[in-house]
Amino acid sequence: MATKSIPPESSTFHKEKHVKYWLRCLKTHLPTAYIPNESQRVTLAFFILSALDILDVLHFKTTPAERAEYKEWILRCQHPEGGFRGFTGTMYGRNAAVNEWDAANLAATYFALAALIVLGEDLEGVKRRETLDWVRSLQRSNGSFGEVIGRDGDIEGGEDMRFCYLAAGVRWMLRKEETGGLERVEDIDVESLVRWIESSVAYEGGFAQAPFHEAHAGLTYSGVGALSLLGRLSRKGLEMSDRKTISHSFVEGLIKWLVSRQTLMISEIEDGLAMAEENGEPSNPMPATAVYPPKFHVQGAHPASLGDAGKPEFETIEVSPEDMLWIGVNGRTNKVADTCYTFWVGGTLGILNQVHLQDFNGIRRFLLEKTQHKIMGGFGKMPGDLPDILHSYLGLANLAVMREPDLKSIDPTLCISVSTREEFERKATTGRRSGSLSQGHGQLDGVH
């Protein structure tokens, strides 16, 4: 079968269009589809600001006065008892009593701190003690974390690996060694959290939402990221740095599962046609370009290595050269590809220092030719979709993981640029040495 000719410009990263997309998100009203996300404005703010930073235009396309206003707005979302709200809409005034409708939540707290770091802040306006006490109050007896403190002081929010990552991230930003430690603030139960994360490993090799659930790429990123932020992964990512409880064989299984998330099922149309045929339903003819590949429906059959390619199970799979042009990434077994999973998988491989195991060319073509919006900029969830903030950011992030020339290098653990993380650490170290790290209400009590 002859390989289809692809115009060279179709594999181009249209940087200026992406810059315009993110500036529209920052400086104009978002489309009506974002109305349900009103309470998550802090999260959206992080994605927008960090995207402009990764594109290396944040300090060229915004003024110092504008960035000061962004910082002021984020700090206005800070809760008086620690943590951050998702937006200012629940505030009843500066002197209003705290109530159950105006609660800090863990996701907003993580993204508020990360956004402040992207803006170049050293977190001096953050109530460190109160926030760390509040985060500790979200930990359950089994080691997992909830999202908010509800009525009567109950921990609310499901047992979810994402909350564990967010808690570990907040702890890292506020309590890492370089920022000086807080002697009088009790720490979270790190050992209990690590045990809970380990117990959530599924038989497939990836991490699940909680014990006995199905492995999922986003949750695997959360689990591995949390272990990294807790200092439990070595630089090589092959074992725990202290307790050595993650074995080499486990990491090999995890990496194999991650690499197996690469798939040739890149279109929901293809999936729908296959289901219709199974159910005996008539299917309307679709353009050939909408269905890739025509004969490849075996999930996880994309060889993980040259050695695997010679195994008998791969010899019976009919694949044309055209099929291999675009490699998508899915989040679970037998699912269609999705832009966001290119980062959840690629970022996790980055944390483990195994990013080279991705099919760079195939994934890049999937992003740039299938989900990049050629007119508006940004990335959609799937081929043909309009761009949205989440998928536009994660598509951009994985291109940065794969070292796209027009983008800044990215730190896969925090999903921010390397330069931003290094600048934050430099300021934190300088502050620790000078004894000037603020907690919103004074100086740090001491240094571990």
Image (cartoon, rainbow, N blue to C red):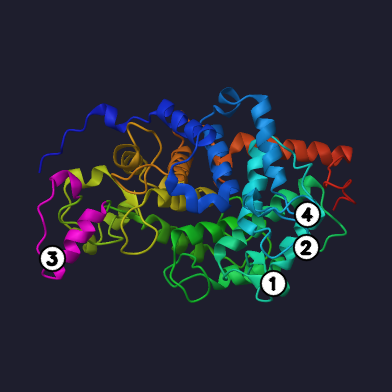
Mark 1 vs 4, N-terminal side: 4
Q: Amino acid at mark 3?
A: Glu
Nearest to the eye among marks 2 and 3: give it: 3
Image: magenta residue range: 267-291
The residue beneath circle 4 is: 80
Real-space CA distance between mark 1 and mark 4, rounded to the nearest whole angstrom: 17 Å
Q: Residues within 10 Å of mark 1 (few under 14, many from 20)?
A: few
- Quadrant assignment, res 68: top right
Q: Amino acid at mark 4?
A: Pro
User: Which SS class for mark 2?
Assistant: loop
**180 or 232: nearer the eye?**
180
Nearest to the eye among marks 1 and 3: give it: 1
Mark 2 vs 3, N-terminal side: 2
214 w.r.t. 259: above or below: below
User: Which SS class for mark 1?
Assistant: helix
The residue beneath circle 3 is: 277
**264 or 51: nearer the eye?**
51
Residue 204: percent from left, percent from top = 41, 69
User: Which SS class for mark 4?
Assistant: loop
Mark 1 vs 3, N-terminal side: 1
Residue 72: percent from left, percent from top = 71, 38
In the shown orientation, is residue 309 left or right of residue 230? left
Residue 331: percent from left, percent from top = 40, 59
In the shown orientation, is residue 83 left or right of residue 278? right
Q: Residues within 10 Å of mark 3 (few under 14, many from 20)?
A: few
The residue beneath circle 1 is: 151
Real-space CA distance between mark 2 and mark 3, rounded to the nearest whole angstrom: 56 Å
Real-space CA distance between mark 2 and mark 4, rounded to the nearest whole angstrom: 20 Å
Residue 127: percent from left, percent from top = 79, 50
> Residue drawn 52% across and 37% down?
51
Q: Amino acid at mark 2?
A: Asp
